[in-house]
Amino acid sequence: EEQLVQSGAEVRKSGESLKIACKGSGYTFSSYWIAWVRQMPGKGLEWMGLVYPGDSEIRYSPSFQDQVTISVDKSISTAFLQWSSLKASDTAMYYCARLAGYDATGYFPFDFWGQGTPVTASS
Amino acid sequence: SYELTQPLSVSVALGQTARITCGGPKIGSKNVHWYQQKPGQAPVLVIYRDSDRPSGIPERFSGSNSGNTATLTISRVQVGDEADYYCQVWDSRLWLFGGGTNLTVL
C-alpha cells in the first residue's frame, strides 16, 4: 500500500528549532515529488514547497522561502520540514503529500497525503 | 498574483445535486484538481485535471472547467459528503489552493 506516514505531534516554545518528518512507503520514493502544505487552525490549505527525492531539487513558495527549510534523505525514504526558530504563528497542522507524477507544472495532482503533524509553538 | 475564489459555504438537501465553483482568470486553460477534507482528516483527492476521478471515488463526483469557472458537482448528495472542498491549480511556478467551500447537507 502506498502511503506517507508523518512524525507525531510537537509542542515547542517560540524561538526553539523543530524538524518534522514524512516517510514514504509502498512506492519508489525517489521518483515522486513530495509537497508540504500548512493548515492553520480553522483555515484553508497553503502550499509551502516541494522536494524531489531523486536529486533533492527543492522549490519554495515565496510565502515560506526563508521561513522554513525542506530537505530529503532518499536512503530512508523520508522528507523533512524544519524551522530554526519557531514563532507562535507557526502553530498549525502540517501535511506532506505526493505529487502523482514527475512533472511539477500542474498536470499531476497531489494524489495522497500523510495524516498530518500538528505543531504548537507557544509564546 | 493568481487567485482562486470559492464560496465559503454551499448547502444542499439530501439526495440533491451540489455544485461548488472555483473562479479564476482563464481558469479554463489550467488543470484544476479538487480535494475533500472531512473534519480532523487529511485531504483526499476527488477530481483531477478538471474531470478525472481517482479510483475509489464514487461516480457521483464529477467536474468541469471552462472560461473563468471550474465546477465540482456532487450528485445524489449523502450525509457523508459533508466536508470542506478545495480547488487547486498551478500558476507561475506556484501551487495555489482556493479558500475552501464548506458543504452542508440539509
Image: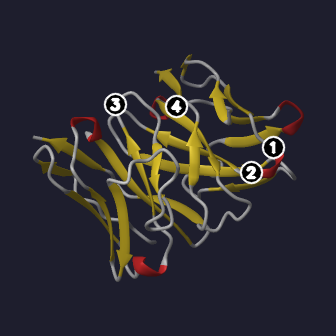
**Along the line of sight, the residue nearer the viewer: B5 or A97:** A97
| Distance Cα–Cα, label 4 vs label 1 | 35 Å
Q: Is residue B34 above or below residue A74?
A: below
The answer to which of marks 4 and 1 sits earlier in the sequence is: 1
Crowd rating for badge 4 (residues with CA inside 10 Å; few <14, some 14–19, many 20+): some
Tell me the amino acid under the disc marked 3: Pro
Of the residues tagged 4 and 2, which is closer to the observer? Answer: 2
Distance from label 3 to label 2 (Cα)? 28 Å
Q: Nearer the viewer, mark 2 or mark 1?
A: 1
Disc 2 to disc 1, C-alpha distance: 8 Å
Pointer 1: what residue?
A28
Q: Nearer the viewer, mark 4 or mark 3?
A: 3
Q: Chain of mark 4?
A: A
The amino acid sitting under disc 2 is: Tyr
Specify the label residue B39 is tagged with: 3
Residue type pointed to by label 4: Lys
Mark 1: amino acid? Thr
Q: Nearer the viewer, residue A18 or B97?
A: B97
Chain letter for mark 3:
B
